[in-house]
Amino acid sequence: MATTYRTCPVSGLQFEDQAEKLMRWNAVAGVLWLLVGGITALLVILTRWPAIKLLPADQFYLILTAHGIDMLILWILFFEMAVLYFASSTLLRCRLATPKIAWLGFWLMVVGGIMTNVAIFQGESSVMFTSYVPMQAAWHFYLGIILVAVGALLGTAVFFGTLVVAKKDKTYQGSLPLVSFGALTAAIIATFTILAGAGILIPTFFWSVGLIKEIDAQLYRMVWWGLGHSSQQINVAAHVSVWYLTAAVIFGAKPLSEKVSRFAFLLYILFLQLASAHHLLSDPGMSAEWKVLNTSYFMYFAVMASMIHGFTVPGAIEAAQRRKGYTNGLFEWLRKAPWGNPVFSGMFISLVSFGFLGGISGVVLGTEQINMLMHNTFYVPGHFHTTVVTGTTLAFMAITYLLVPVLFRREMILPKLCQIQPYLFGISMSVLGLVMMGAGTLGVSRRHWDMAFSGAPFQYEWPGAAYLMMGLTGIFGVIAVIGGGLWILLVVGSLLFGKKLDGGKVSDRPTPIPPSTQAASAVAHGSDHVGVPGTVVLALLLFVCFVLYYFVNWKYLSEVWLLS
Amino acid sequence: MSAILPPSDRLWWKQPIDKVEWAWIAIAFVWGMVMFVMMIYWHVYGKQNLSNEAYKTTPEMFAAKAEKFIAENTIRTEIGLNGEEIPVAKVPAGGAGYLIARLWNWYPILELEEGQTYRIHLSSMDYNHGFSLQPVNINIQVIPGYEHVVKMTPTKKGTYAIVCNEYCGIGHHSMLGRIYVK
């Protein structure tokens, strides 16, 4: 199939025509799902805010189910498809393999997403994102998710195929760029995540139409989390790749060590699936040995990987800044960073919030015994709003400020608001995560309509602090929705009304990546080595917070009833 | 030269790793091992570990055992806020108590004594439920088809609530149970 290649005059990136169209369509579809997810987020927040309690119970659970599906699956997966095509076709400067299959995947995801949403909004499928059996949704709820998964699997296959094309056409020499390597780990994790999902959702679909009589409730939870948690690992691999991408584009940063960063990505592939077990720590059906083995031994290797990226990403930025001469003190490199550029500020808030809030809370939550203090409380959504939202979503939002001019050839409108948006969204969402965790620490349940337990045979009064935390959840939740809504407005507004930019030269054959020069290799070896003392201080600060918070929770645990 | 280009040194895996990076990797590794050992340590010396004892069951089998327990151990009945009669079963000290989770209540009310150890059998009659003891804040998943035997020793007198914290349908928020510790 004949295709063309466009070289962006601003960034020098080269876009193949089909890949470019697919990236645009996937990104736009993702933004539209984020819009639906954002509206449902507002309704959820206004209902859980005790002073407002907007929706009745049935509508609340319906909306909460839609919020989970539209955000966790649809917004993120569509955007990730764009990331995969970018990391393969664009970064490797080659044609996209089998674009027709990529389009088939895209439309399957669109149809599946709409089908599941129709099922939810018809009202018979308020089963939450997790859809634990034996609670049953309508058949098209499951079928829609299966179609989305098949579509995503096709997109992943196209990504793998594109890597092969690049190798065969020799559009680059040596090894894959680190960002493409990170995307490759995301795609590998996606493959077995989706297979785990097929392993549980296909039988559940048959069960919903009456072909299978029963699905064991514990077995469902175990296999489902092979999908549910691992899919978050796709997100981590993808957003860490986006962090490296941002550092490379803004600062020309190169990894401190290719070996260390790639090894850390590899650890994700090897160990994060097993960590899915941490969702089952308070379940009856697994032994303590199984829980400890899967969540510690294995999960901590993946935690180690994230700690490594948490060091090497800011380290790469620091090294690049110091090479440019920002060498005063520990933090001149950081103070003089382009804080007014939303691509950078969004990425850096994402890094800090994911590390300090999402990362630490996740490990504590995933500790076998401590899990009993938090399982199914509001702590859990507090935790994942600082991983999936301030981590993944914010990283994707930030990189979009780069993609709009480069990929969509439009200038961002209202640059002042663009500057503010990452701070507004990132900070309010981080505080939201914190106060949600606070409410959860006091026992408040997740997925619960009424803190006053109306209609119950007894009364139970939550501590006043729990109401305070839920009130703050309401306030910061609304601010976060405004911050997210602002991003959608800016992006959609720029796509429609932004100043059109020059697309650059179009050619009917790709320009390969020039091989690195001898001089560049020599430089990489020694003379340009710079220390990263500021990053060391930041990393040690993270470590101290981590250790303190970890042991504080053991102290809490030691104060509850004795259990054995 | 950068993360979006192939490594400038084709033999990148032969480049030495900086000692600061090594140090951080070592810290992360050791910390992981500390956290791993902590869980095992707590199993040996800690006093809060979730029981490993669980059996496959059916709602009918579990309900039969629970009804027998209630028939033998009910000391009084209480009237709930909706006018329903709820038995209060005093669990024999050191003995077994049964707690049914179902749409949408915890049944019966259990009465325990401070400092005594009990074997509390938990199971669900229908969907997943969540045993969330408040204000102590202990949270345990309750799954239909599985009978979980949790050994509990209350450490303080009082009236405790069991909140359901696993979404179980429209009446989820009204699923509130009670435990007395005398």
Image (cartoon, rainbow, N blue to C red):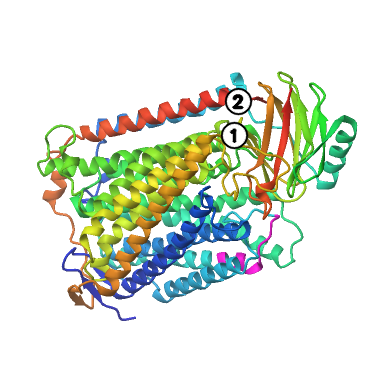
Region rendered in magenta: A134-145
Question: Which quadrant of the view contains residue A195?
Answer: bottom right
Q: Badge 2 sits on which subunit? A: A
Question: Which quadrant of the view contains residue A306?
Answer: top left
Mark 1 vs 2, N-terminal side: 1
Label 1 vs label 2, nearer the camera: 2
Residue A525 image offset from top left, x and y in percent: 17, 41
Query: Which residue lies under the disc numbered 1?
Result: A372
Residue A267 visible, this orientation: yes
Q: Amino acid at mark 1?
A: Met
Q: Badge 1 sits on which subunit? A: A
The answer to whether residue A370 is left or right of residue A487 is: right
Label 1 sits on a secondary structure element that is helix
Q: Characterize the local packing of mark 2: few (<14), some (14-19) or many (20 or more) Cα atoms within 10 angstroms.
A: some
- What is the CA distance from the residue labelled 1 to the residue labelled 2? 10 Å
Residue A305 visible, this orientation: no
**Circles 1, 2 touching at the beta carbon (< 8 Å):** yes
Q: Amino acid at mark 2?
A: Val
Residue A144 in the magenta stretch? The answer is yes
Q: Observer-nearest residue: A543 or B99?
A: B99
User: Residue shown at 55%/34% (left/top)?
Assistant: A463
